[in-house]
Image (cartoon, rainbow, N blue to C red):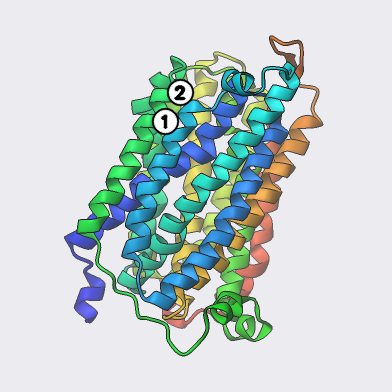
Amino acid sequence: MKEREANLGSRVWLAIVVFGLFGQIAWVIENMYFNIFVYKTITEDPDAIALMVAASAVVATLTTLLIGALSDKLGKRKVFISIGYIVWGLVIALFAHISVANSALIFPHKDHLQLIAITVLIVVVMDCVMTFFGSTANDAAFNAWVTDVTSEKNRARVEGVLSALPLVAILVVFGGLDPLIRGERWDLFYYTVGGMVTLSGILGLFLLEDRCDKREGTSYLKDIIFGFRISAIRANRVLYLVFTAILIISTAFQVFMPYLLIYIENYLQVEDYALILGVVIILSAAASIVLGRLVDRYGKGRFIIPGMIIFSLGCLMMFILGKTMAAGDGVAIAALTVCGTIMMAGNLLLMLVLNALARDKMPGTQRGHFNGIRMIFSVMLPMIIGPLIGSNIIKASRTTFIDEFGLVQSVPIPEIFLAASLLSLLLIVPAIFILKALKPQQRAPLS
């Protein structure tokens, strides 16, 4: 048993990479390209993006809580992963039919502003539907399955790979499908991504094996509310400290992340940012994989404070660069690549450490449920608070432009990175208590 835990095997690694990658490709579409889709085809109002992100976050959290506890109760993950991915992809494909023009066909007597509002509402509702199936498959079932098949000996290594996959997904989508977006072929873009996600779900029917202990002796309702009880929080104090640390760093990340590509293209006026993004992704992903192995070897606790410093410094450098960078300056663009890599590497290091610690501390028969609790701290609250902070900073700025309809639109500004840098420093508070609670071997010397 110990040998199997230390060496996952090729089949498990293949499943981790396949479902981790295709799940992240779908989340890239939602978390980044939906924002660009709304900004370029519907409205430039940052509140529309903030509303979409917040609604999606709430649905994702509730879904993970409900389905996570259900998968614990049934002792099954495979069916939720496979069927979830299949339907997830089909819903993504439906976005090919959402546009202001199509809304005008359905509501021919509405004016342009009313059609924009209707289309935004349609996007938000469909985004929530997509999120339901995505969170069922990925957040609730797949994440619990990963915890089922890993151990404390290899979780940081696995988290290093899982943390790198969102960046790899960006590279896949951006490198392979961005030409469709630049050619305004959103329909083909959504069909392609949806097809890939659906195919991965079909593959899961043959690839996955359940290794989940069935939870017995309790009711489903009690399992859903268990993690909200004061007694449960006290009994799992370190786990909730880790959740608090995840909340802080995830919120800081969400202050700028929904607006990142819009900021690069419209504030920095770097239209051809493919090379920058590619270099940042490759270097950060490689760093995440290497750091995951080091964290397993030397202990998770040693890397929390360094990760915080690296991330905060990277955000600060992005702010300074944004205030001083001249459009088209080759040296500044190179500096942007360096700063972006430092910022992303710091975030990945923190998340792989904290997520691995969370997996270590989750009760064995309630991993699905506690993945739902984790979603409150890692997704719901950060994706409500972070984008709203970013949106208010953006709207307070005088950096605007007039669109083709004569409306004043806002542009993301460098201060969103300064806010993220300052907010991330709050991580020091839970980190102190986490480090005190960790076992000696988790803070092992580097010698």
Above or below residue 131? Residue 92 is above
Above or below residue 392? Residue 9 is below
Marker count (numbered): 2
Most foreground residue, 379 or 277: 379
- Residue 5 visible in the snapshot: yes
Q: Give the residue drawn at x 36%, y 58%.
A: 81
Q: Give the residue drawn at x 47%, y 16%.
A: 184
Left or right of 239? Residue 86 is: left
Percent x, y for residue 215?
Answer: 42, 82
CB contact under 8 Å: marks 1 and 2? yes
Which amino acid type is marked by label 2? Trp
Residue furthest out toward the left: 10
Q: Which residue position is annotated with label 1? A: 190
In the drawing, what numbered circle is on residue 186?
A: 2
In the drawing, what numbered circle is on residue 132?
A: none
User: How would you rate the neighbour count of disc 2 (Cα within 10 Å): few for under 14, some for 14-19, many for 20 or more?
Assistant: many
Above or below residue 50? Residue 441 is below
Percent x, y for residue 118?
Answer: 68, 30
Left or right of 359? Residue 307 is: right
Query: Is disc 1 placed on a helix, strand or loop?
Result: helix
Left or right of 198? Residue 97 is: right
Which amino acid type is marked by label 1? Tyr
Q: Give the residue drawn at x 58%, y 61%.
A: 62
Most foreground residue, 102 or 406: 102
